[in-house]
Structure formats: C-alpha cells, structure tokens
Image: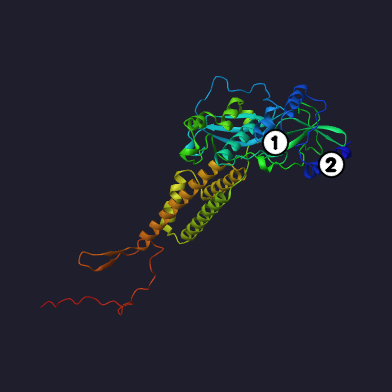
Amino acid sequence: MIFRKKLSLCALLAINLLAAPGVLADDGGNDDANNNNNNNNNGDDAANGDDAYQKYFANNGQKNWDGFGAGNDNIQYWTDYAIYPDRCIVSNNVDVVVFTFHEQRYKQCSDKPMGTYITPVSNFLEGYLQYYQQIQQDKGNDDYALPDVAQYAYCTQKYVNGEEYWLQIGCSDTDRHSIAVNIYTDNTCTKRSTVDGLDDANIDVSEIQIPFKKCQACVMWVDKSDDQIDDMFFENRQTNAPLCSTSWNYKKTCNRRCRNIGQDRDGWSTPDKILLTILGLFGAGMLFTIVRRREKMSNKDALLEQAAMNAAGLQQSHVIGLFILYILVVIIFALQVMKNITWAMLLIMNTALFGYLMKLTIDSGVGQGETVIGPDGTIIRHADSDDSSTDSQPPTPNANAGTFEPAQLPEIA
C-alpha cells in the first residue's frame, strides 16, 4: 500500500510538472461545486481569465468554519492597521495561519498587537491573493492573472492513475513559515493521505507564498497620477483591504494552547550572535584583567576585602562557585533561545565586572601613590602606603655603627 501511494505521488509530481495544473476532473464530489463549474464553463475562457479571483475563488465560495468570524468587531477604515503573519500550524485538524493585528501601521508591527488570531489557510490565502492582485492593478499591470496553482486554495479533485485524490493548500510539513499543497482522500479535505508521515504534494507554490514574518500594511498605496484615479479611489482603498478584512472576518482568537503550537524557536539571528560574541569577549577580557590585578593586590587591600566577605558570611570559594553557576545559567538560557533574560543577565554580569574592575583600578592607584603638584609647582610624590609596595632598600650604614662614645663631662675644679 505504501509503495502504491508513493507511486501515485510520483505520478502526481510528473503530471503537475509536465501538464497544466489547471485541468480538473469534475466527476463526483461536491454537487454545488459541479453546478458552479458547469455554469462557469458556459462563459468564454479568455474573458474569465481577466478576472483571476473569479476564476479561482468564486466557484468554491467561502467555507464556513466553526468558531471563526469577526463577531461585532467590524472595522470600516483600514488605513492605520497592519497585519503580521507569524506561522502556519494545524489546529483541530485545520490548517490555519497564526497572525497578529496592529493599530499603528507606521511602527512596522513593533507595537503591542490588538491580539493573536488564527484563520484557515484557504481564507487567508484568498485575501492575500486579492491584496496582491490589487497592487498589480494599481501598478498598471491590468493583464496580471493569478498563477494556476491558486486553484488549490480550496479543496480540488484530482485523478492520478485512476485513483481519486483531493488537493488543497495548507501548511507545509517541513517548514511552519511556508505553505504547500496537501493531499487528501475525501472531498472535504479532512482525511490526509500521508506517506512516511508527510502529506505534501510536489507542486510549486512559490508564486503565491504567504509572506510570513513580514509586517504587511492593510492598505498599500501606489503612486498614481490624478488622471488615473477618480474621486472614490482613496475611499475604496481605505475600506477595501482584502488581506486584512478577510483575515479579520474569518478570525478566531488564538488561546494559550494555540500559541504554544509551533512556537518559534528560530535561534539567534546573525546580529544577535555578533552582539553575544562582543558581550562575551568583553566580559572575558574584564575577568582576565581582574585576575591579573588581584595577583598584584596589596596585603592591606586583600585583608580588607576578605573582612568584607566574612562580614557577609561568604568565603572566596563561595563567590567563585556562584559566579560559575551564574555563567552556566546564562548559557542554558541562551541555548533555550530565551533572548530577553539572556540579554539582561549578560548586561548585569558585565556591569558588575566593570564596577569591580574600576574598584581594583582605583585601589591600586592609591596604593602605589599618586603624583601631586604642590602649590609652588614642585612635583610631590606620596610615599607608598602599604607594605607590599614599600621598597626594601637597606639602610645607609653608619660609620659609627657598633661603637659607643661616652659623653665628656666637664672637670670640677
């Protein structure tokens, strides 16, 4: 059976690469879809080709999903809004896009989102393709038509070697930031046909790939001269935002469990790694300098520092152990890509090391004596104040050392 499915998938790949993917079989399946297809076939294909949205979406209608909808939160003007497609996940056996809405478009989705939502891939893709087609028309590409692969936005029937399959665009099995054409065995596209745990068909969808991890303005303005637009152009653009309005109308709140599905663990970006390296090297350099300065620390300063630690109930071994433990915790958080706490702990550690290094530098400067200019302009150098920095020079020998001369008393007459 597995061999048969693999053979079917290979045949499916060959068919889609060598033949036009727009050829569909109308046998069986949904009666409504067949009726609509028959009605559409009565028209002229060339004329229908001018309206790609009607060609690929109008025949399918908009599928009703339980729990998805805008409710009473209707938005009329979309000028100031932006949408951020985050990832594609499977929730309750439905392929959905996780996205956030933002009320301040100019902040490039860096502001606090209105909420995190999900909407079926088919509905989100429908809005995105209308949005993209709208942009192309504004640019003057009136002949632009959606690619043939867009027909798989909804459940589409396909025969391979006499065996019936149903195809629909959903989430990729290998990349949560990508979509793919999935294979199903029923006309509702709910029973997945999997081989080795994968259900993706080998059909190229790069032309209609959803821009995950990129902030999208709900209203895209294209420079046009006054002769190219009418009085209602700007009004229509503000109220007709296909990507955002479709996603909003078919949204569902993404709860905590939903947000945990496919949660991003993208690792550290290149700028993050560079900054981590800089902070790590800076901290290591300060630690090395501290060790060298402690080796030259005077006995007096060492005793004072030891007394301070004893007063706090600590020993030098305790401090070293706590520091090593702190480093290990930072490494663990970094490996878990917990960026905020990693940055915070690195900054705290480097700040503490820098402060202690400055203390050692000041103490060593005072201990070795500072050069001071007196009021008369002469240079006065303070004598060293501790025993470790005192020059051990032998005293000048006294010529009378070791001899005793008694005092001469006056003679009494």
Q: Of the residues shown, which amino acid type is indicated by label 2? A: Ala
Q: Quadrant of residue 120?
A: top right
Q: Which residue is found at the position 39% from the left and 57% from the top?
A: 363
Q: Which residue is found at the position 68% from the left and 34% from the top?
A: 47
| Marked residue nearer the N-terminal end (1 or 2) | 2
Q: How is the image coloured?
A: rainbow
Answer few, some or many: residues within 10 Å of disc 1's Cα (few below 14, many 20 plus, some between 14 and 19). Answer: few
Q: Nearer the viewer, residue 65 or 282?
A: 65
Give the SS element for disc 1: helix
The total of numbered circles placed on residues is 2
Answer few, some or many: residues within 10 Å of disc 2's Cα (few below 14, many 20 plus, some between 14 and 19). Answer: some
| Residue 80 seen in the figure | no
Q: Which residue is found at the position 63% from the left and 35% from the top?
A: 129
Q: Give the left or right position of residue 44, taking residue 331 as reference.
A: right
Q: Report which residue position mark 2 lands on.
A: 11
Rendered-image quadrant of the C terminus: bottom left
Q: Position of residue 258 (x, y in %)?
A: 64, 29
Q: Residue furthest top?
A: 72
Q: Position of residue 10 (x, y in %)?
A: 83, 42
Q: Report which residue position mark 1 lands on.
A: 46
Q: Is 205 rendered above or below residue 284?
A: above
Q: CA distance from mark 1 to mark 2?
A: 30 Å
Q: Nearer the viewer, mark 1 or mark 2?
A: 1
Q: Residue furthest left?
A: 413
Q: Position of residue 368 (x, y in %)?
A: 37, 63
| Residue 279 seen in the figure | yes
Q: Position of residue 381 (x, y in %)?
A: 30, 66
Q: Nearer the viewer, residue 22 or 295?
A: 22
Rendered-image quadrant of the N terminus: top right
Q: Give the left or right position of residue 330, taking residue 36 as reference.
A: left
